[in-house]
Amino acid sequence: MTEIRVPKLNNNDTEYTLVEWLVDDGKPIAEGDPVALVETSKAAEELESAAEGVLRQSLAAGAVCAPGDVIGHVLAPGETVEAAPVAPVASAAPVPGAESSPAGVTITKPARVLMSEWGIGEEQVLGWGLKVVRRTDVERFAGPPPAGTTETVVEAETVGETETKPASPALASPAPAALTPTAPTHSAKGTVPTLSQALPSVQQAVGRSVLTSHQTIPAAYTVVKVDVTRAQTLAAQEGKRLRRLVGLPELLLSAVARSYRAFPLCFARLADARTAELADAAHVGVTMDVGQGLFVPVVERASDLTFEEIVEAVSGFRRTVMSGTFRESELSGGNITVTLHNDLDVVAAVPFVFPGQACALALAGPQQELFLDSDGAVTARTVVNVGLAYDHRLLNGRDAVLFLQRVKALLQSPEKLLGEA
């Protein structure tokens, strides 16, 4: 008999939700088959069977589980045991509409709790056309907020690339954030109702990372100005050639990855007060937020990839972020992060350093400026500010400047990024 245990999927969560079983109880499975879908605060992850045999479930879909919990067993061929009762979904208080839904749609317990809080009926949820409805789906797709509350509309940004799979109509109109009246405050003008808004689970995870970063990492910040006139021209050319959205983010990510071997400490982690643990490659995270929450998918071994392979990886992330269906494995393992703040009005941004990493680079928006060239003529160019937040225990100011100067040199000679890694 082999146990099916919930692994530690990330460092931010202490509990997950067993969204659904992918194989029915008592059915045969092979080693490596996906058997269950577990939801963290950021992603949904499939758990695979470590052995061949017959599945015996011990936890119901929709229940909360923690890292290390046994949620089922795999019986070896010919092995027979009396089936253990499946643990039901526990609830501290009755939740309206908590019974199982028709039409084969699974609605998780956290989703039902939010439906109850927002007054969302099951009929509306079933109309979304989803096989599994999670709390994040309710946050995204729900209709108007409950009566008596104030509506806040959050409009999603366009990504600039056509989604390849049919999109739900609700994707074009993300769920408004529901504001709930709470205890009133009193002033000289009388009683004033106070409104509160529940934070999505993705934002709660971001908050935990930010808090840990500020409490544990003595960070410093340096910024350089980069002439990206040639880089923008090359990006447009590569976009046409590859038929992909290519811009400064892809070039910056590539420049960072190409700097791994020259600046290994920028990709290291602090093992203890005296030791830096060096990385085997540059695993570069890149921020993405289109109004559905902040995600940081990771381009694995970016230092070994060609520019075209990096573009393909980022293009895939752009498609996935629209549905918010990243796997936990896609969001884990980064050892440096590129944060995108490249709207035209953004002059500079200071990122936080993700716990377990040494650096985070911020790309600001392109700005037009005039300068005198070597012949004394006034010429226009496009510049951006690229900033580096870094753990001062691993790096000093000179290290940061040299690293940024290398990245700057690559961006100003972007053709060097098109060769082999």
Image: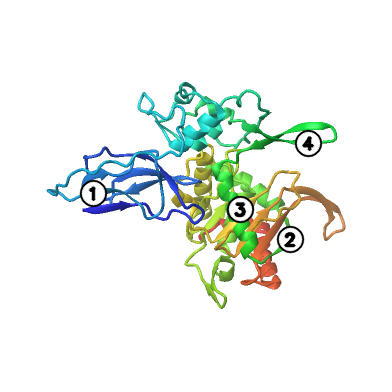
| Quarter residue 226 falls in | bottom right
Q: Amino acid at mark 4?
A: His
Q: Nearer the viewer, residue 109 or 164?
A: 109
The mark found on residue 257 in the picture is: none
Label 2 vs label 3, nearer the camera: 2
Q: CA distance from mark 4 to mark 1?
A: 60 Å
Label 3 vs label 1, nearer the camera: 1
Residue 8: % across, % down: 42, 55
- Which of pointers 2 and 4 lies earlier in the amino acid sequence? 4
Residue 323 seen anywhere in this rendered image of the structure: no
- Which of pointers 4 and 3 lies earlier in the amino acid sequence? 4
Q: Which residue is mark 4?
A: 186
Q: Amino acid at mark 1?
A: Val
Label 2 vs label 4, nearer the camera: 4
Label 1 vs label 2, nearer the camera: 1
Determine whether, in the image, residue 262 is placed left or right of residue 181: left
Determine whether, in the image, residue 143 is placed left or right of residue 371: left
Q: Amino acid at mark 3?
A: Leu
Residue 224: % across, % down: 73, 61
Q: Which residue is mark 1?
A: 74
Q: Which residue is drawn at the image coordinates 39% and 26% (left, top)?
A: 101
Label 4 vs label 1, nearer the camera: 4
Q: Which residue is mark 3?
A: 251
- Which of pointers 1 and 2 lies earlier in the amino acid sequence? 1
Q: Describe the element under mark 3 as helix, strand or loop.
A: helix
Q: Which residue is mark 2?
A: 224
